[in-house]
Image (spheres, helix red, strand yellow):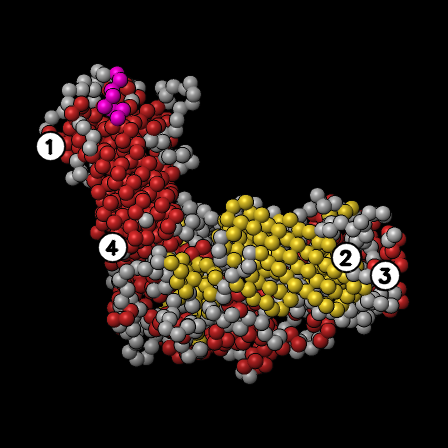
């Protein structure tokens, strides 16, 4: 038996230790888990950690550090050792969190209503009228059920004597509940026996309560079913992963502001089947961005007119607009008196000692005890990092004091808390527990009875260093699952497979938002485009490598076609592609800034995929994730031609797995149809333009050109299996254009598109289909006989070539017309941004 | 003294160039209730007719209307016409001198954990930063020489108004609706809104409460010329909290360096322009979004105009 993990686990006199008592013994509620952990072999633990890492990476659990569409997402950091809390202790914490949520809701009701708290002097006007977070247009707006605060998060810390304190309230659009859920799904599988034997309380009940609570508040007209959406600011947001994750878990459509539209006093979701009324908006977008008509006018994210819907009581917004106000730390000192006033109760859990500098005596105290305090902004909208008094000296200290005295109401001082420490598995050692400061973010949500349910557990956040005073996910902190034990059996309820009635069955996907459909369409087009570009570039590179980098006529011909297809930039007027071929090709692969480049297509593909993330299967997403990593890592090096070819091989491999998933794993609803239509339109255009260009190029008459044309169209194998001889013009043209059994042929794309268009004809109008079919018919009627004895490789002018190319052009025109038509009929037009107007 | 009666016409026209598919507008075009103003008639004509409309009062007690258009349209014309009388309510020097010392008032408005007076609490709505009014120490510095210790608040306000009038130049080209106050302070140029915002910011930086007032101003055509229709513009000025005087608030017009009386017609009161912009909207589609605005203020009975204004009459 290896030495116990306790042997080198550090004790601390300054901090409360979650696992150890003061005498160094393991606390009773940790005993079983610790013994289990102590007994796990290094190999076994290694496997378990691998499992956790893999699961997080493959699920794409990320936390965007800064907004970057090219993919600066960082994997979520999870420590496998949970924080364990015994049932009796949790009962107290939970009651205190529920009380605080109810209190904050009552304060919002007062501040947006009667304002008795101000009239009685229980709250300074500066903390209400002085905050940008107090939204004046929301004054007097009464939400359904008088609920302003539907969901609430609170950051808790434990002081050295073991007592829990409130550090911060989150009332705007609290994040992290989804990450807590994901942590649970991972950690409960890392320690399945312990999870079962310790009777850890499940989280699903909490989310069901939240679901029911929102449903109960839906202001329904007779005959309506509640329609609840989750509003996200979009993929740039740091917690977008969570928005998509929760939307999928709770079964609410994930929407962006542009998906919603207000008509009069009703808000609607733009769907494929027209406008569908929305009753409840679970909002992850900050409130002042929600309605550019009355709130921030510079916001393109919002839903113009939403406030009027709220005013009419026709939508429940969770949390109500204006709720962000209460996240101000300056309120904390006033809460005990307000709690007695509004609830007639004593505040159950104290807040960390907080002095709002806007009060003279408080400012005096702060001046005298500066070294023991942390200075923070009084208003959540202020951008300022916490400042530790004792770290400031000389001029910096004087400057800070001057700033506070100039605008005392904008600052609060808080006493420093020595956070509790908890055991954390060290990644740097083979088998070691280290101690890290932790804080707990707990969650409450309104249930169907209008009371607050508290999530049993929450998100335990871990500071990065042993001596850290601040926990921040932005600064590289990690997280833990939180296990609240129970004395008896736990509820086995799960949202993942709850039972449905016949009425709940959803088959059509008629509620698909227009934006989702639009993004799926572009996902289809981009995934084909990057496949096509990769294939063309590989053809060119392979030839270039074969001839040792020399620019042979064959290489020149391929480059010319690539220019025609806009995969390569057009050369300067009198510029020659010469020695630069290699450079030009590498840029076309790796440089996302170059128009038409492969890297650009990959980026666009990721972008549309990110927007429909909640619709993609996990496998689908993993496959895309791998592609992105591949591109980014390759972009940093200076690859050789051979490495570039290997990269293209892998891109094509990922591409084919992606298509496999699309065909095999995605639900065949209308969204899927748009994906396929997008794909077929893109392939049709690529092939038709490519073949037409080829037929017109005199350089294509060189030896071996037909071989690379087949390769580019991914039809070499089919050709060889049919003709078992070297490529000749007539059979090649037949295979690539006319053979409707070749999935990489022109006619095949037309046939598939026609089938889908038939189903849509009612809505789309027959014009699009008939124009496409007319162009296809003329092509099909084309007489191939003149090609029979055509000496293609010698001929200079080629009349039949020109005629065939003209027919292919027509087909491209009809396909583009169709693409535009789909856009006009079905899409949101995300390019059409609302604008603010102002007249004096 | 007799009330002065006006006919006010405020017309806003948008020619969008191409169709707007969806438009929502918020109107602050109807005059709020005031003891010295009497509205005889007021109507707002809108073309095309809005699909939807809601009327109400905003959080500051101003009439507000929301309208929306759900059908494509390529122009919008809003014509507000009112027949309104302003009763003289002059502020004399004695009133200014009798107002509370500004530093006493500042202390009264600061929070002291006691229940505030009702009117003081009302005034604190206008005591802090607002979207167009940053409160910075540069502003307090600028105003400092107008407010020596013990100066009655309204005497200080009058000195500040005179200082702004003397040091700043009226220049419609210098600023836009979103020019920050500090930039106006630096460049010393702007229009009535800028001067109002600047004066409000200075007062709030000193710990005093000040409101933004929007409305109209009677302008006089050049001698011998007829009054031109649409030659006027909407106007903005400042209202300063001075409990115990009149209705606790006294108006100042820093653009013209005068104390508003019967020549100023009040529409709305807010923390700043953003609370009460006359016409604010969100449109989808269209080309141009630049409005044509024409305001005309005509005294209904020239006989009743105070003598000082009649030098241009024939």
Q: Are marks 1 and 2 in contact (CB under 8 Å)?
A: no
For marks 1 and 3, give the one nearer the viewer: 3
Which quarter of the picture shows residue A477? bottom left
Q: Secondary structure at mark 2?
A: strand
Residue annotated with mark 2: B298
Q: Residue at x 63, y 61 (%)?
A: B44
Above or below, A154 against B297 in this view is below
Total residue callouts: 4
Q: Are marks 4 and 3 in contact (CB under 8 Å)?
A: no
Disc ID at residue A646 = none
Labels 1, 3: one chain:
no
Q: Residue at x 20, y 30 (%)?
A: A782
Residue annotated with mark 3: B303
The residues tagged by marks 4 and 3 sit, at their Cα atoms, a distance apart of 80 Å
Q: Position of residue A314 (x, y in %)?
A: 47, 69
Chain at numbered mark 3:
B
Labels 3, 2: one chain:
yes
Q: Residue furthest bottom?
A: A344
Task: Please provide the residue range marked out in magenta.
Answer: A796-803
Residue nearest the observer in this picture, A694 or A355:
A694
- Please state if A321 lies on the left or on the right of A277 as rendered: right
Q: Residue furthest front?
A: B314
Mark 2 nearby-residue class (10 Å; few <14, some 14–19, many ≥20): some
Q: Residue at x 41, y 72 (%)?
A: A220
Q: Position of residue A43 (x, y in %)?
A: 25, 56
Q: Secondary structure at mark 4?
A: loop
Residue annotated with mark 1: A722
């Amino acid at each position: 038996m290896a030495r116990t993990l306790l042997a080198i686990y550090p004790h601390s006199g300054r901090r409360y230790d979650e696992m150890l008592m003061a005498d160094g013994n393991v606390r009773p509620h940790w005993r079983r888990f610790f013994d289990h952990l102590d007994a796990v072999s290094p190999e076994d633990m290694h496997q378990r950690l691998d499992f956790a890492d893999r699961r997080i990476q493959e699920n794409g659990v990320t936390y965007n550090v800064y907004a970057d569409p090219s993919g600066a997402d960082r994997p979520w950091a999870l420590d496998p050792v949970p924080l364990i809390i015994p049932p009796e202790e949790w009962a107290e914490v939970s009651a205190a969190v529920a009380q605080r949520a109810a209190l904050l809701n009552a304060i919002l009701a007062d501040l947006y209503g009667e304002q008795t708290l101000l009239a009685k002097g229980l709250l300074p006007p500066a903390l209400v009228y002085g905050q940008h977070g107090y939204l004046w247009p929301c004054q007097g707006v009464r939400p359904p059920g008088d609920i302003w605060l539907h969901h609430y998060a609170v950051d808790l810390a434990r002081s050295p004597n073991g007592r829990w304190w409130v550090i911060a309230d989150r009332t705007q659009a609290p994040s992290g509940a989804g990450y807590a859920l994901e942590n649970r799904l991972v950690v409960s599988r890392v320690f399945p026996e312990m999870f079962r034997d310790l009777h850890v309380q499940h989280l699903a009940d909490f989310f069901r309560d939240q679901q029911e609570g929102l449903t109960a508040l839906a202001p329904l007209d007779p005959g309506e079913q509640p329609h609840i959406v989750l509003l996200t600011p979009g993929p740039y947001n740091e917690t977008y992963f969570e928005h998509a994750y929760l939307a999928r878990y709770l079964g609410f459509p994930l929407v962006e502001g542009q998906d919603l539209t207000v008509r009069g006093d009703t808000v609607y979701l733009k769907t494929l089947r027209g406008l569908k009324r929305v009753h409840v908006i679970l909002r992850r977008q900050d409130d002042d961005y929600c309605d550019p008509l009355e709130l921030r006018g510079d916001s393109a994210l919002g839903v113009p007119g939403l406030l009027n819907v709220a005013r009419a009581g026709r939508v429940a917004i969770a949390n109500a607009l204006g709720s962000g106000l209460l996240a101000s730390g300056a309120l904390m000192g006033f809460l005990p008196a307000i709690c007695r006033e509004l609830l007639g109760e004593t505040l159950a859990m104290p807040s960390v000692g907080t002095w709002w500098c806007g009060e003279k005596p408080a400012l005096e105290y702060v001046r005298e005890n500066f070294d023991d305090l942390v200075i923070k902004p009084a208003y959540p909208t202020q951008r300022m990092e916490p400042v530790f008094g004792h770290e400031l000296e000389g001029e910096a200290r004087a400057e800070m004091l001057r700033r506070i005295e100039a605008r005392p109401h904008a600052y609060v001082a808080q006493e420093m808390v020595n956070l509790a420490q908890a055991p954390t598995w060290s990644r740097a050692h083979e088998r070691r527990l280290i101690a890290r400061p932790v804080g707990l973010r707990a969650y409450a949500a309104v249930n169907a009875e209008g009371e607050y349910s508290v999530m049993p557990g929450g998100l335990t956040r871990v500071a990065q260093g042993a001596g850290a005073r601040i926990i921040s996910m932005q600064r590289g902190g990690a997280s833990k699952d939180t296990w609240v034990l129970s004395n008896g059996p736990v509820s086995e309820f799960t949202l993942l497979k709850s039972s449905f009635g016949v009425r709940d069955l959803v088959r059509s996907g008629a509620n698909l938002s227009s934006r989702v459909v639009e993004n799926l369409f572009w996902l289809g087009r981009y995934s084909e485009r990057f496949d096509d570009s990769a294939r063309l570039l590989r053809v060119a590179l392979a030839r270039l490598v074969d001839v040792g980098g020399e620019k042979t006529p064959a290489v020149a011909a391929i480059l010319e076609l690539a220019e025609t297809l806009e995969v390569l930039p057009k050369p300067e007027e009198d510029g020659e592609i010469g020695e630069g071929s290699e450079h030009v090709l590498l840029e076309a692969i790796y440089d996302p800034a170059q128009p038409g480049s492969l890297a650009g297509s990959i980026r666009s593909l990721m972008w549309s995929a990110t927007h429909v993330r909640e619709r993609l299967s996990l496998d689908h997403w993993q496959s895309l994730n791998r592609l992105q990593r591949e591109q980014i890592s390759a972009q940093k090096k200076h690859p050789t031609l051979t490495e570039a070819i290997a990269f293209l091989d892998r891109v094509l491999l990922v591409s084919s797995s992606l298509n496999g998933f699309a065909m095999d794993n995605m639900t065949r609803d209308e969204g899927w149809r748009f994906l396929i239509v997008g794909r077929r339109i893109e392939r049709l255009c690529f092939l038709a333009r490519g073949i037409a260009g080829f037929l017109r190029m005199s350089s294509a008459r060189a030896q071996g050109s037909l071989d690379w044309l087949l390769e580019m169209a991914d039809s070499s194998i089919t050709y060889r299996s049919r003709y078992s001889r070297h490529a000749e013009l007539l059979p090649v043209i037949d295979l690539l254009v006319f053979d409707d059994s070749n999935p990489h042929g022109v006619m095949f794309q037309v046939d598939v598109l026609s089938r889908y268009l038939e189903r849509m004809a009612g809505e789309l109008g027959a014009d699009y289909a008939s124009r496409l079919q007319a162009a296809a018919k003329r092509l099909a009627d084309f007489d191939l006989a003149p090609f029979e004895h055509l000496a293609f490789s010698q001929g200079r002018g080629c009349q039949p070539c020109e005629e065939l190319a003209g027919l292919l052009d027509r087909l491209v025109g009809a396909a583009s017309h169709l693409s535009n038509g789909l856009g006009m009929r079905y899409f949101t037009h995300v390019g059409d941004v609302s604008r603010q107007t102002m007249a004096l | 003294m007799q009330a002065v009666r006006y006919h006010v016409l405020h017309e806003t026209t948008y020619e969008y160039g191409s169709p707007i598919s969806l438009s929502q507008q918020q109107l602050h075009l109807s005059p709020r209730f005031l003891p010295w103003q009497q509205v005889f008639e007021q109507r707002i004509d809108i073309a095309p007719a809005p699909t939807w409309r809601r009327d109400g009062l905003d959080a500051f007690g101003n009439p507000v209307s929301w309208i929306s258009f759900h059908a494509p349209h390529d122009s919008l014309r809003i014509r507000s016409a009112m027949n309104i009388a302003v009763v003289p309510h002059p502020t004399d020097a004695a009133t200014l001198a009798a107002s509370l010392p500004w530093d006493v008032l500042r202390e009264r408005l600061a929070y002291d954990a006691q229940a505030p007076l009702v009117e003081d609490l009302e005034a604190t709505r206008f005591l802090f930063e607002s979207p167009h009014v940053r409160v910075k120490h540069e502003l307090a510095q600028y105003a400092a020489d107008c407010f020596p210790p013990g100066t009655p608040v309204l005497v200080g306000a009058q000195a500040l108004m005179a200082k702004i009038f003397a040091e700043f130049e009226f220049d419609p080209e210098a600023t836009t609706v979103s020019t920050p106050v500090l930039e106006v302070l630096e460049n010393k140029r702007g229009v009535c809104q800028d001067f109002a915002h600047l004066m409000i910011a200075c007062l709030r930086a000193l710990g005093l409460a000040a409101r933004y007032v929007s409305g109209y101003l009677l302008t006089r055509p050049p001698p011998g010329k007829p009054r031109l229709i649409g030659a006027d513009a909407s106007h903005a000025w400042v209202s300063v909290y001075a409990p115990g005087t009149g209705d606790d608030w006294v108006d100042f017009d820093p653009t013209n360096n005068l104390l508003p009386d019967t020549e100023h017609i009040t529409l709305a009161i807010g923390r700043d322009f953003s609370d009460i912009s006359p016409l604010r909207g969100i449109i989808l589609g269209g080309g141009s979004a630049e409005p044509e605005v024409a305001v005309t203020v005509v005294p209904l009975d020239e006989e009743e105009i105070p003598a000082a204004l009649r030098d241009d009459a024939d």
